[in-house]
């Protein structure tokens, strides 16, 4: 399962919002969650991995979940992206 977002936060994805995403992803023990942008794919359960994507405003970020709780994980991560003002869902 996958959802794609356009980054809208003027600061991009920096340490504080990246931490919120990582903390949410790690709650889903039976699910692998990845972040992909610019051809680079990292685990969403690593703060350094997320920050290494260097996400800036206007960039596209795909969140990918695989496993038993994939749907719940993506829903929770979408909530974080929207509530934190990080990105908007791309159709």
Image (tube, grey):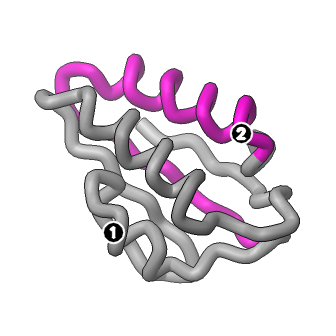
Residue appearing at x 65%, y 40% in the figure = 81
Up the image or down, 36 lies above or below 18; here it is below
Please tell me which residue lies in front, 18 or 29. 18
Residue drawn at 46 percent across, 30 percent down: 74
Query: Compared to 14, does 71 lie above or below?
Result: above
Q: Residue at the spot x=61%, y=61% of the render?
A: 61
Tally of numbered tags: 2
**Number of other residues with Cα within 10 Å of mark 1, as a class: few under 14, some 14 to 19, many 20 or more:** some
The magenta segment is 59-85
Name above or below for residue 8 compared with residue 58.
above
**Res. 82 image quadrant:** top right
Q: Is residue 16 left or right of residue 85?
A: left
Residue at the image position 73 percent from the left and 68 percent from the top: 12
Q: Earlier in the sequence, mark 2 or mark 1?
A: 1
Specify the quadrant of the image occupied by residue 54. Answer: bottom right
What residue occupies the far front of the structure in this picture? 16
Residue beneath label 1, please?
42
Q: Is residue 60 visible?
A: yes
- Quadrant containing the C terminus is top right
Q: Which mark is residue 51?
A: none
Q: Is residue 87 left or right of residue 10?
A: left
**Image location of residue 55, percent across then percent down:** 64, 74
Q: Which residue is denoted by mark 2 in the rendering? A: 84
């Amino acid at each position: 399962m996958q959802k794609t977002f356009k980054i809208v936060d003027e600061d991009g994805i920096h340490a504080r919002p990246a931490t919120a995403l990582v903390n949410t992803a790690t709650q889903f023990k039976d699910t692998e969650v990845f972040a992909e942008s610019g051809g680079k794919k990292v685990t969403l359960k690593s703060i350094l991995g997320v920050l290494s994507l260097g996400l800036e405003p206007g960039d596209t970020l795909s969140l990918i979940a695989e496993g038993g709780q994939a749907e719940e994980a993506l829903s929770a991560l979408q909530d974080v992206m929207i509530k934190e003002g990080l990105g908007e869902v791309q159709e």
